[in-house]
């Protein structure tokens, strides 16, 4: 992801999340040496993106999103596989993320890639209120 992608990624955030990241917040992450953001392009369209932060050898997915019209085409899987490979190459011991329990499609994807349910964060999400399931992939 580069600065030219920020407006499209911010628009994607607005479509996919009830509490989206701002364009400014996304742009600031491009300057963060611990952050790794990737976009999936279909032609000129940013169809999806993933953000990962790495701290002391641990990798955390901050967000992964795919535009509704591009879902079920392997874009989310490709983004996650690229993030997994990148974190592994940079020496991270694991990759972890949070997901809403109601997001069955995402949970199936994570589990198909080897992520395991490790815990639950009570009241993590707002709008609507929901716990978060913590999934982790150990290398």
Image (cartoon, rainbow, N blue to C red):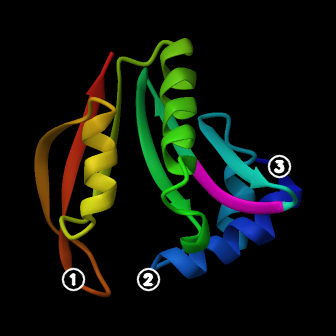
Residue 82 painted magenta: no
Apparent side of residue 10 relative to residue 56 in the rendered image (left or right): right
Magenta region: which residues?
Answer: 45-50
- Name the magenta segment's main secondary structure: strand
Up the image or down, 124 lies above or below 32; here it is below
Alpha carbon of mark 3 to alpha carbon of mark 1: how far? 32 Å
Tell me residue 91's x, y (percent): 48, 12
Query: How would you rate the neighbour count of disc 2 (Cα within 10 Å): few for under 14, some for 14-19, many for 20 or more?
Result: few
- 3 or 1: tag closer to the N-terminus: 3
Query: Badge 1 is on which residue?
Result: 129
Apparent side of residue 2 relative to residue 11 in the rendered image (left or right): right
Tell me residue 96's x, y (percent): 33, 38
- 16 and 58: which is toward the camera: 16
Query: Badge 3 is on which residue?
Result: 2
Label 2, secondary structure: give it. Answer: loop
Snapshot quadrant of residue 14: bottom right
Tell me residue 3's x, y (percent): 85, 56
Up the image or down, 61 lies above or below 115; here it is below
Label 1, secondary structure: give it. Answer: loop
Snapshot quadrant of residue 131: bottom left
Asked if labels 2 and 1 touch by Cβ distance under 8 angstroms, the answer is no
- 1 or 2: tag closer to the N-terminus: 2
């Amino acid at each position: 992801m580069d600065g030219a992608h920020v407006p499209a990624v911010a628009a994607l955030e607005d479509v996919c999340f009830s509490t989206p990241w701002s364009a400014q917040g996304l742009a600031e992450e491009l300057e963060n040496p611990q952050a790794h953001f990737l976009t999936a392009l279909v032609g000129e369209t940013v169809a999806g993106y993933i953000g990962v932060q790495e701290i002391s050898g641990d990798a955390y997915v901050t967000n992964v999103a795919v535009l509704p019209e591009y879902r079920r085409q392997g874009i989310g899987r490709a983004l996650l596989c690229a993030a997994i490979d990148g974190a592994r190459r940079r020496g991270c011991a694991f990759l972890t993320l949070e997901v809403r329990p109601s997001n069955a499609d995402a949970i199936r994807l994570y589990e198909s890639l080897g992520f395991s349910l490790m815990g639950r964060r009570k009241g993590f999400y707002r709008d609507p209120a929901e716990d978060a399931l913590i999934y982790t992939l150990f290398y």
